[in-house]
Image (cartoon, rainbow, N blue to C red):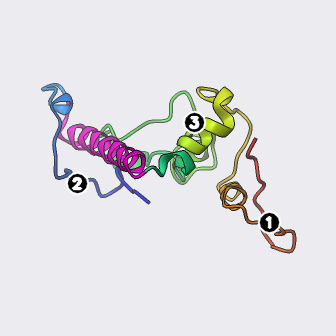
Amino acid sequence: AMQTPHWPLEMPPKTFTECEDGNMKHERRIFCNSLMYADQMIGNIVVNLKQKQLYDNTVILFLSDNGPNTNWGNKGYGQTLPLRGAKGSTFEGGIRTPAIIAGGYFESECGDMIGETYNNMVHITDWYAIIEHLAGIKDTDDEDVDGINLWP
């Protein structure tokens, strides 16, 4: 699991020219470089999966556990507009986060859903049931799990 970007923010081992805007505050440049580095790492993983012919059987999940922490001051680390609240709050800005599902398995099984938006509620515990389903684990009715398998 990758935790980039995450507090405490540190400059990644590589910097990107896209983040060298002179109007950008130092903290925002660190955040920008962290995001670009994460994007590059994910891209490298996808390339390697394809080279090793594993991509077609892969599901990539990209998600967050909460909204941004606005208690760090207005340093450009993120904001939740138009939602109210942030990390540590029960308002939507603290608990409603984007999630992306990708990978060859998703493309072959759910290709008609690529680019679609799912606007219903998904709880972090639902991912367990979804991953269990994707792994082919059956007969789990006796498990005491709150998650729901929402895989289409």
Mark 2 → mark 1, Cα distance in angstroms: 42 Å
Chain part drawn in magenta: 24-52
17 over 57 or under it: above or below: above
Q: Nearer the viewer, mark 2 or mark 3?
A: 2
Residue at figure coordinates x 66%, y 55% from the top left: 127
Disc on the earlier residue, 2 or 1: 2
Q: Nearer the viewer, mark 2 or mark 1?
A: 1
Residue 143 pos. (x, y %): 81, 73
Sort mark 3 into few (<14), some (14-19) or many (20+) by Cα contacts within 10 Å. few
In the image, what residue type sits under mark 2? Glu
Q: Nearer the viewer, mark 1 or mark 3?
A: 1
Residue 85 pos. (x, y %): 55, 41
Q: What residue did someone put label 3 on?
A: 84
Q: What residue did someone put label 2 on?
A: 10
Sort mark 2 into few (<14), some (14-19) or many (20+) by Cα contacts within 10 Å. some
As drawn, the label of residue 138 is 1
